[in-house]
Amino acid sequence: MLHRYLAVLACVFLGIMSLRQEQRMDRLEDAVDELHQIIKTQYHIDYTKTELDCLTRNIYYEAGNQDTLGRHAVATVTLNRLRVGRWGNTVCKVVYAPAQFSWTLQRRLARPDPAIYADCEVVARQALEGHRVKGLERSLMYHADYIREPFWADAKNRIGQIGRHIFYTKGLGSTIDI
């Protein structure tokens, strides 16, 4: 009788372990799928600590509440703007260009959550090393899906949506193209 009980207990234990392993594999597969959306390109940028901090802050305040892909998407647009040059010739000039990122208009900002900020810094480093989101290589604009569509939003230039942001190649009336 004890042997039968131990055998059943062992089967239950192995079943639970197998289920947990499947759940881990599902999470791992999801992470791999997300990483496949992030590609390394020839867009490596030599950067300073200050520029890393500017990009990290932009990612944190624009997409800190999103997943890694959403954060990379914001970094991609920021660095696309740097490449174009219209918004500035350094990461910090792009981030603090007048009225481009809503958080820069606020007088007081919430103190960053250290763990989320650290994750945003990892994304910033990866972006500066050349990682971009596949499909957003030409994106220069985005807005949150929960706001009224901005005057510059042009449906024919809409690329798609990642997380809470809708991405565009350029704004209405813009002659900039990459």
Image: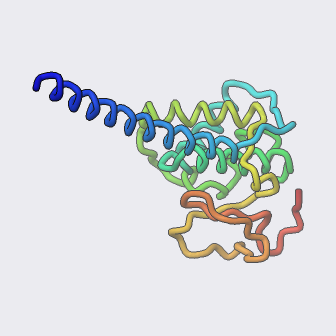
Q: From the top left corner, tell me how far across and down residue 84 is, in percent.
A: 86, 50
Q: Give left or right: position of 78 versus 56.
A: right
Residue ID at (78%, 76%)? 156
Hey, which residue is sitting farthest left in the picture?
A: 1
Figure quadrant of residue 120: top right
Figure quadrant of residue 46: top right
Residue ID at (78%, 37%)? 40
Q: From the top left corner, tell me how far across and down residue 114 is, in percent.
A: 44, 31
Residue ID at (21%, 29%)? 9
Between 27 and 102, the one lying in front of the other is 27
Figure quadrant of residue 34: top right
Q: From the top left corner, tell me how far across and down residue 178 is, in percent.
A: 88, 56
Residue ID at (62%, 32%)? 53
On screen, residue 98 above or below 53: below
Q: Give left or right: position of 57 versus 114.
A: right
Q: From the top left corner, tell me how far across and down residue 1 is, in percent.
A: 10, 26
Between 142 and 105, the one lying in front of the other is 142
Hey, which residue is sitting farthest front in the picture?
A: 1
Between 117 and 175, the one lying in front of the other is 117
